[in-house]
Image (cartoon, grey):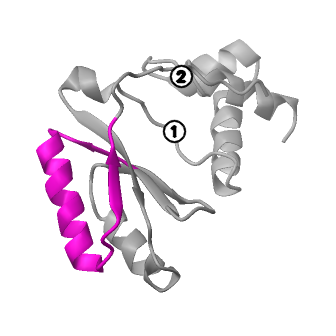
Amino acid sequence: MDDIDSKILNKIQSDFPIVKRPFLDIADQLHISESDVIDRIAHMKNSGIIRRIGGNFHSSKLGFVSTLCAAKVPENKLDIFVKEVNSFKGVTHNYIRANSYNLWFTFIAKDMDTIERSLQGLSETTGVKDILNLPAHKMFKIKVDFDM
């Protein structure tokens, strides 16, 4: 990454322009060509620096509920458990931790009953019985920007 790549990342991480040609808008701000912005973003995506470009929304303002889940998954069941967790449309991400509750994931759905039924089905399908549903009682939302 060079200085231009860093500047592009600073522009797109939280204030992606919502205009007809967003990459041209970024290019104009950085005094480079639109194709250079597109090529650089593609290179950063292909090299794994950028995972995705997309919007984030407040699920609660759209009438959804969300929760954090944690599970004690035996090592020999991790692959199948992760595959099952990833099959749910409302799971936004999951990760392994060095803890007895070793697999954590977030789940968004239309209501908590849907999440509870999904977690019960997950338990029945995988044989993993210890799955926690940890909904937030109060949200403390912070904005995280990484100054490149």
**Quadrant for the N terminus in the image:** top right
Give the residue drawn at x 34%, y 54%. 132
Q: Residue furthest bottom?
A: 76
19 left or right of 121? Answer: right
Query: Of the residues shown, which amino acid type is indicated by label 2?
Result: Phe
16 left or right of 105? Answer: right
Location of residue 31 (image quadrant): top right
Q: Position of residue 82 (x, y in %)?
A: 42, 69
Please tell me how crowded label 2 is: few (under 14), some (14-19), or many (20+) other residues with Cα within 10 Å. Answer: some
Q: Position of residue 116 (x, y in %)?
A: 18, 52
- Per the image, the residue denoted by label 1 is 53
**Over which residues does the magenta segment extend?**
106-135
Q: Position of residue 65 (x, y in %)?
A: 24, 34
- Per the image, the residue denoted by label 2 is 16
116 left or right of 70? Answer: left
> Does 124 appear above or below 4?
below
**SS category of the residue bearing label 2:** loop
Give the residue drawn at x 54%, y 65%. 100
Residue nearest the observer in this picture, 119 or 92: 119
